[in-house]
Image (cartoon, helix red, strand yellow):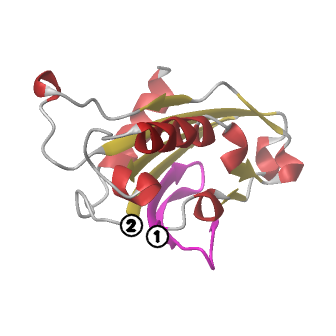
Amino acid sequence: MHPIHLLALLAVLALPAQAQHAHGEGMLDVVIDKDSIAINLELPLDAAVGFERAPRNEREKAALAATERTLGDAALFVPTPAANCRAQPPKVVMPAFGAKAGNDGHGDIDASYTYRCANPAALKSIETGIFKQFKRLYRLEAQRAGPGGQGKQRLTPKNPVLAW
């Protein structure tokens, strides 16, 4: 990780912590550094598929696979079009199940997205389509750090845009 990214991420992490795990509520950390955007999403498994345990049948296994595919699409987040940002391949980490997983009963999905922007000065917002994909998700607690400072914002189905 670039040292500036690390410093910006540390600045975001220094913001007051939100509740660690709430059903229907995810966490979004956004770090903007020069021409890049790093987005980290933490989504409760329950908000995505309706359960937080190992899948019990083929339908539940299919729901997990579909969720991983959906979150693996960088188009889930849309930076300001004028900034001309290009997505790098996202990384999605699904919860591990089983005796060795150390699961505390609260499964979370972690996903990270990186974008490179040709015109970063035009970057003013990031819109998400995540609420259209996951109807059980009712809010994202978003934290942002970048050249314009840092801030927090609550994203909801009616307000899916992180703006600054």
Q: Which residue is mark 1?
A: 139
| Image x and y of residue 15, in percent | 32, 57
- Tell me the mark number nearer the camera, choosing from 1 and 2: 2
The residue depicted at 67 percent of the width and 37 percent of the height is 73
The region drawn magenta spans: 136-164
| Amino acid at dot 2 | Gly
| Image x and y of residue 113, in percent | 58, 35
Which label sits on residue 124? Answer: none
| Image x and y of residue 31, in percent | 52, 43
| Separation of residues labelled 1 and 2 (CA atoms) | 7 Å
Q: Quadrant of the C terminus?
A: bottom right
105 relative to 124 in the view: left or right: left
- Asked if labels 2 and 1 touch by Cβ distance under 8 angstroms, the answer is yes
Q: Which residue is mark 2?
A: 24
| Amino acid at dot 1 | Arg
Question: Dot 2: few (<14), some (14–19), or many (≥20) neighbours within 10 Å?
Answer: some
Secondary structure of residue under mark 1: strand
Q: Earlier in the sequence, mark 1 or mark 2?
A: 2
Residue 31 vs residue 65, the one in the foreground: 65
